[in-house]
Amino acid sequence: MSSAIVGIGRTAYSRRSGRTTKAMAADACRGALADAGLTMAEVDGMCTFMVMDSAQPIEVAWALGRDQLAWANGMYGGGNLVADQIATAAAVIEAGICQAVLVYRSLNGRSGYRFGTIDGPMQVEGDGQFDAPSGFLVPPQWFAMWARRHQHVYGSTAEDLGHIAITERSHAERNEHALRREPLTMDEYLAGRFIAEPFRIYDCTSEVDGAVAILLASEAVARGTNKPPVWLVGSANSQSGAGWSTWDDPTEMYARSVGPVLWDRTGLRPGDMDVACMYDCFTYTVMATMEGYGFCEKGEVGSYFAKGRATYGGDVVVNPHGGLLSEGYIHGLNHHYEATLQLRGDAGVRQVPDARLALVTAGGGPFGGANIYAKDKP
Amino acid sequence: MSDALLLPPVPLPDADSEAYWESLRAGTFAISRCSACRTWMHPPLEACRRCGAPTALESVSGKGNVFSFIVVRHPAVPGHAPPYVIAVIELAEQPGLRLTGIVDADPKAVTIGAPVQATVAEIGDSGMFAPRFQLVAS
């Protein structure tokens, strides 16, 4: 691929923004434009993903003074679409339809529409209607159901999940933008209240309000921007409608099929990655996808984290910003922001030394994907 | 007096699912099955996802096993008082034929693989009915 990330922007992350998703999206997009040294006149495409909880690209473009776009795409879906969406924007650029595309995600995920809670009464349509009677309708329950199966089949433990939460929190301690920065010990993790067993509070992402924007551009545009471009090396995605009860093996996620395709497509291997921004709506998502992408064998993720292989000085630094678990749930687009900072060498006190390649994953369960970014043009 | 905010979510039937919910309302647990290749499928589909032939509901035994389960401790969804157990049940009729349901049991008594039997019960006082599951001796 020949597109690059040339600008990144974001708002503050908070529990109550007091702003519209349109205002935050526009703010984050302005940040990305300023970062790149481009103007809105040079942007001809915009896209986002959402669950009808956010402003549409044409509204945000209008707010930014752009009267029309060549491509405006609002995809319905969650974190499973992040890598897909950036890769699609790159494909749109490489097809010659656009020269620069802003990809944003803006949500009042804490003060507005919350993914983890349902306020009754409600009628549930679509495939969710069959889970309405049991109330099996929110992500913490879905992923906990899958984690239990992994524990049953592979003997993974609460402590294994705890090591993931603790490692990510230790990274967030050095990130001023993170929502949760206080140190976390295993005793505190284990004493955390249960949400849906086997998940404790620390297994769950931190819901926040905020926005992130990523500005993707053609090579021709990228050569003239302020900061060193961060190149998209390749992308692979797998989207399934199996749902949360019919997926054949919940000890595995979409990564079982995306991993081999991604490595084959890019000629790279897990061992080549300096940074891995693993989608971590829940600790178990990291566990199952680290296995799926081939960082370790099934059942070994707990010891992988416990032995320091997922932090500075180890094999690969997983979520140097603290991830969705500790930095906050900007639906995974903040992972791409962090990868860009790291590959530019702009991550400050949490810079991964000589970071040249980053894996950024998206989604969990039956659907998701990943992109690989590089400091040097592939 | 029931508090409206504590009512459970209820299904909104559509053309593919109307017969499924109607059957439950009449007290029969029945699942969508292909008229040609005989594959069971849930959620119900108008036509078989394997061969495209028409489907029809057929009664199932209600026997199955716990494939996985959670113990809900945080009241994220109204309608049930924590702690309670939601399980993915694999029905005896076909490997991989699964659906979710409440298991009426002490959370400590539920294990993966445990045999269960379905009963049909009203969802709150909604006038709609759904399968629930009880542990049975293996």
Image (tube, grey):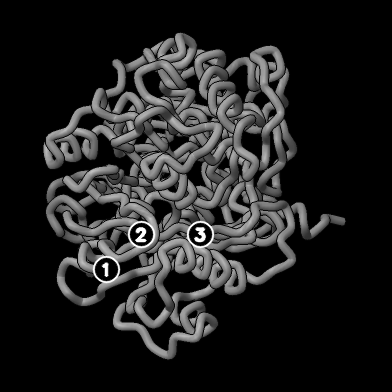
Give the side of residue A346 with respect to residue A172, left or right: left
Give the side of residue A288 with respect to residue B41, left or right: right
Structural distance between the alpha carbons of marks 3 and 1: 18 Å
Q: Earlier in the sequence, mark 2 or mark 1?
A: 2
Question: Which quadrant holds residue A101?
Answer: bottom left
Q: Which residue is mark 2?
A: A6
Q: In the rendering, at what x and y percent does residue A290 appear?
A: 35, 27
A3 over A189 or under it: above or below: below
The quarter of the picture where the N terminus of chain A appears is bottom left
Label 3: which secondary element: strand
Badge 1 crowding class, 10 Å Cα cut-off, few under 14, some 14 to 19, many 20 or more, is: some
Q: Which residue is mark 1?
A: A221
A251 over A333 or under it: above or below: above
Kind of residue at badge 1: Val
Question: Which quadrant holds residue A179?
Answer: top right
Pick the front one: A172 or B3: A172
Pick the front one: B47 or A43: A43
Q: Which residue is mark 3?
A: A9
Q: In the rendering, at what x and y percent does residue A313 appear?
A: 42, 16
